[in-house]
Image: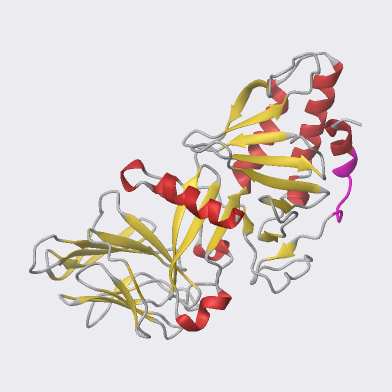
């Protein structure tokens, strides 16, 4: 039986594979075992909230307020994080009790003594309430803390300007520097780097007491563009020969059951020890193939099938390809020209000037060991 026929059978199953649940999500999925998950699924579209990383809420308050200037110093974010600005550094005080200091040399410090960096040009911190704190550092020896912006959606406040306190609002330029996400209670810092719909998270700072509770790396698969590419693919393949029709019908069936196969908020269990392959819902498996050094492939398999049904070639312009079902075309890997995916979370896509693609691939290779 070819992979396309097995797919048509498998998509009719709702509970063919156990898919674990991300902490904090609701639903009927079984909780994960003690081992920390390597992959989580997110249905985010344009931007991705920190909570979708499956690494905690970020130490913010449950009740959301409005971004505002603090009466004494700096700003308060919608989630209650106080951003205090001084010449000696920028301190973030989280409602959880966690404190984070960005020093004038660009190093990020926890009160317990752990540090990361230094990030000499500054950095942008993504908070659990959706706001960001952008800290620009000057290269001179005096007044290293140059500008601080706190942003929430279309609202931009500047509590520190040209080395001095300020209370200015307006807009800021695109950030081209390092970004870190504040996870856990606010003090678990990860660097997010996206390769198309695959977000790679590299842990850069964590309290010593939380080392065993936080994964060194985490992958987040953005399912919205993946599901949309599966839905568009059948419209691009209208050949009349039977093998192609069966393969297209299988892809269409997968697209119709996308919420079962790619449940939002799920954490995926490893299917094999020697390969980056994980269990999905409905009898499907997801694999990350890194044989191509600069363009890894995300592959969708029907159970233990040796050939993927669909492959997503990850990169700046990710495309989905249907595995060639015709036996008379030896050596041709894909059928058709591919289905382009829309660009997602553009602000987190890997950037050449920061060498983020090689760094993201290193993180993926660590998982493979």
**Camera sees residue 186:** yes
Q: Position of residue 223 (x, y in %)?
A: 63, 47
Residue displayed at 60% across by 41% down: 225
**Camera sees residue 47:** no
Q: Position of residue 131 (x, y in %)?
A: 39, 64
Q: Nearer the viewer, residue 131 or 237?
A: 237
Up the image or down, 99 lies above or below 67; here it is below
Q: What is the magenta segment's predominant secondary structure? A: loop
**Left or right: 44, with 271 as reference point:** left
Q: Quadrant of residue 86?
A: bottom left
Residue 342 magenta-highlighted: no
Residue 12 magenta-highlighted: yes
Q: Quadrant of the N terminus?
A: top right
Q: Position of residue 344 (x, y in %)?
A: 50, 44
Residue displayed at 55% across by 44% down: 197
Bounds of the magenta segment: 9-16
Q: Quadrant of the C terminus?
A: bottom right
**Left or right: 99, with 332 as reference point:** left
What is the tally of numbered marks visible in this picture? 0
């Amino acid at each position: 039986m070819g992979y396309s026929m097995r797919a048509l059978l498998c998509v009719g199953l709702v509970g063919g594979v156990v898919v674990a649940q991300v902490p904090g999500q609701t639903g009927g999925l079984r909780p994960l075992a003690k081992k920390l998950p390597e992959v989580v699924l997110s249905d985010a579209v344009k931007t991705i909230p920190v909570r979708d990383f499956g690494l905690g809420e970020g130490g913010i308050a449950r009740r959301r307020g409005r971004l505002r200037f603090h009466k004494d110093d700096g700003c308060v974010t919608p989630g209650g994080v106080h951003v205090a600005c001084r010449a000696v550094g920028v301190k973030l005080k989280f409602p959880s009790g966690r404190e984070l200091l960005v020093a004038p040399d660009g190093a990020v410090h926890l009160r317990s003594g752990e540090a990361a960096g230094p990030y000499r040009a500054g950095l942008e911190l993504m908070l659990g309430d959706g706001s960001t704190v952008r800290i620009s550092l000057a290269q001179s020896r005096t007044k290293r803390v140059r500008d601080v912006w706190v942003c929430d959606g279309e609202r931009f406040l500047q509590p520190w300007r040209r080395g001095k306190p300020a209370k200015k609002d307006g807009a800021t330029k695109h950030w081209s520097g390092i970004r870190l996400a504040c996870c856990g209670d606010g003090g678990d810092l990860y660097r997010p780097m996206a390769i198309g719909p695959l977000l790679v998270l590299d842990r850069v700072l964590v309290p010593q007491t939380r080392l065993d509770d936080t994964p060194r790396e985490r992958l987040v698969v953005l399912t919205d563009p993946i599901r949309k590419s599966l839905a568009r693919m059948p419209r691009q393949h209208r050949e009349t020969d039977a093998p192609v029709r069966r393969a297209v019908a299988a892809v269409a069936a997968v697209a119709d059951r996308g919420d079962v196969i790619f449940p939002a908020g799920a954490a995926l269990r490893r299917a094999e020890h020697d390969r980056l392959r994980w269990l999905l819902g409905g009898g499907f498996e997801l694999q990350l193939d890194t044989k191509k050094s600069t363009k890894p492939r995300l592959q969708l398999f029907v159970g233990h099938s040796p050939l993927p049904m669909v492959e997503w070639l990850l990169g700046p312009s990710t495309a989905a390809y249907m595995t060639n079902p015709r036996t008379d075309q030896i050596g041709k890997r894909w059928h058709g020209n591919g289905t382009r995916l829309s660009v997602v979370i553009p602000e987190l896509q890997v950037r050449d000037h920061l060498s983020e693609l090689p760094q993201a691939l290193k993180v993926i290779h660590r998982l493979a060991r």
